[in-house]
Image (tube, rainbow, N blue to C red):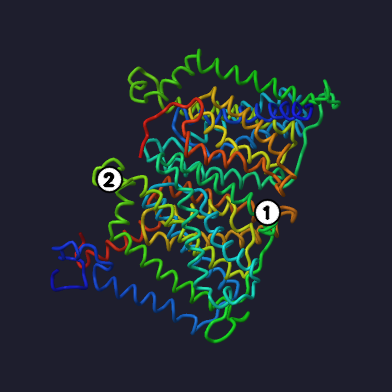
Amino acid sequence: MSANRWLATGNYFTTYQEEQRIFFTALDRLFCSLLLAALFIWPFFMELDSKYMLVIDNILVAVIAILGLNLVTGFAGLISVGHAAFVGVGAYTVACLSRVIGDQHVLITHAWPLMILISGFMGAIFGGIVGLPALRLKHLYLVMATLSFQMIFEWTIGFMDFFNQGQTIYVGRVVWFTGTVGRNEHYLFWYYTLLVVVVLCGFAVRNLLRTRYGRCLVAVRDNDRAADAMGMHPGFTKVYAFALAGFFAGIAGAMHAYLYRGVGMESFTLHESIQYLAMTIVGGLGALTGSFFGPAAIKILDLQVEVLAEWALKYLPSTMNLATALRPLSFGLVIVLFLMFEPRGIANWWRILRSYVKLWPFRY
Amino acid sequence: MSYFLQLVVSGIVVGSIYALSALGFVLIYKSSRVLNLAHGQIIATGAFITYSLTVMAHIPIFLSFLLSMIATFFLAMSVEKIFLRRLIGEPIISVIMVTIGLMSIIDGLIYLTPFGSENFSFPPFLPEQPIIYAGISISYTQLVGVIITFILIGAFSWFFKKSTVGISMRAVSDDQLASMSIGVSVPRVFGLAWATAGLSAAAAGSVIGNITGLNFGTLHAFGIIVFPVVILGGLDSLLGAVVAGIIMGLIQQFASGYLDGNWGLYGTANVLPYILLLVLLLFKPHGLFGTHEIERV
């Protein structure tokens, strides 16, 4: 490593350790720390309307889910059309427990970090089971496996009395060191919790991709026969990718359950699965930064669509429900347009920006 | 016994519609190896076109049936031309995701029309009194639907086996490079495959619409039930699609006839196909008639 640790220009790697560091330059590290500090500090200086606070919390929940979906779809190259169902598995783990032992039980309200972890593992178990066909088959068939899991999940929730037939199951308020988290600070509390979880998950994924367990995902995606020859087991790698995706989805689901203080069917339908796919594609498949850009972009688009629908309703007969029409339309358009014109997603724009800064002060 | 036979009859009715829906899906997969997730939406579009031609333009139903098939023929062809043509050569994963996007787009477009939220039913044009024979009843609409379905399936298999276009489609599905070298235009074949799929989808949609009434939810569910059907039949076999469609119809009817209401189970017809799909993927992924590709991971 050369003397200048701030710019990438003129630096070259002499060891593998250097190549695999999380931050390549000190500038990267500084930028990331400043960004994190800003994310943690801003609520002290300004107060957002609780509607927008909920949107931000939603984005963070989606980020956790997308970190998982990006692992399985972006890095391992397997399409999962049932990601919302895996998120649902996590959410219903919390909900079912609160139905069995009561939603004010100490396990739900006090031991919520444990609940979130348990939900993650439940998601991983289901992910692994659904991924089992990957031992024999390629991605075409896995689309069907995940799709059928989505349908089975929807049926199970919708028709079983135990799951309240898809109606809302309530989850109690959590307790923190300062006492029960009340109505006023609910969204703020979950903003901070989600932020911590997102940071942990983000670093977990970044670290995973430095180790052999992450790199084997990419190797199997790029050429499974070569990966096989290098001593990896492609089938197990794919099952493991599904299990990992399920883990992140389960965590996201549990956070969703706590954030909304209840779990209902409508957040885990096929439509939501497609929305998750849209987030992954828009963010950028196989790019870690994409997992952050995608959910933000799609949720903001969603907000804009609602505004547009409200505005258009002034000029149109009020019988039409414009938002339900415009939402799938905009998601579909976004998916198709990004795939056709920018298949590497928003993360690619970020990469272009970075590569400009990286070469500074030279032009090329 | 007559209850059992009644279930068999209605299973065959439902199953033949599944077969017709699966036909278009298999056509696209066979020629271009694309899983078309938007198939249910094309089915719905076809049904709605037929309905609006019959009811709003007062065209006789059989004529509007044909007109809607022609309309979806060109619609599906242009969908292929606009969205999928430029993705030839891209990894198959992005092509599948484009069809997922299309599914969403068509959903949105249908929600913009009244068809998205309301229920419609075709004006009755056949005697409403069902035929009853030995305690088994079948309505005229169902009977005509099944007859139309089998005529169409026969026409499609003739088209595939004998006509030049059908043979070139089979050639492309077999080996793209070899068929290019003997002068088959591969993009044109892809377009035609989508177009014929659209045509069969419109036929399926109109038959479904006549039997069950027009409801967007039911119609586009047919695009998803197609998956278990084609996996059971083998992804690239037309015969398999027909046989598996009928088997799937029977399974669903037996499930709702015998399982529902017992042991606290309801709506099992909607879930059994998918459980079967998961099991099939584990143990017999090439289905009943599919080619055994050596596609081990």
Name the secondary structure under disc 2.
Answer: helix
* Horizontal relation, residue A76 to residue A158: left or right: left
* Horizontal relation, residue B142 to residue A229: left or right: right
Q: Quadrant of residue B186?
A: top left
Amino acid on which disc 2 is placed? Ala
Q: Which mark is residue A160?
A: 1
Amino acid on which disc 1 is placed? Met
**Residue A245 point in image, percent of width and height:** 44, 56
Dot 1 or dot 2, earlier in sequence: 1
Up the image or down, B275 lies above or below A207; here it is above
- Residue, far right: B129
* Quadrant in which the C terminus of chain A is drawn: bottom left
Residue at the image position 35 percent from the left and 22 percent from the top: B180
**Residue A301 point in image, percent of width and height:** 53, 60
Q: Residues within 10 Å of mark 2 (few under 14, many from 20)?
A: some
Q: Mark 1 near mark 2, Cβ–Cβ under 8 Å?
A: no
**Residue A278 point in image, percent of width and height:** 49, 53
Up the image or down, A120 lies above or below B113; here it is below
Q: Nearer the viewer, residue B145 or A136?
A: A136
Task: Give the mark count.
Answer: 2
Q: Nearer the viewer, residue A216 or A353?
A: A216
Q: Residues within 10 Å of mark 1 (few under 14, many from 20)?
A: some
Question: The residue marked by circle 1 belongs to what chain?
Answer: A
Question: The residue marked by circle 2 belongs to what chain?
Answer: A
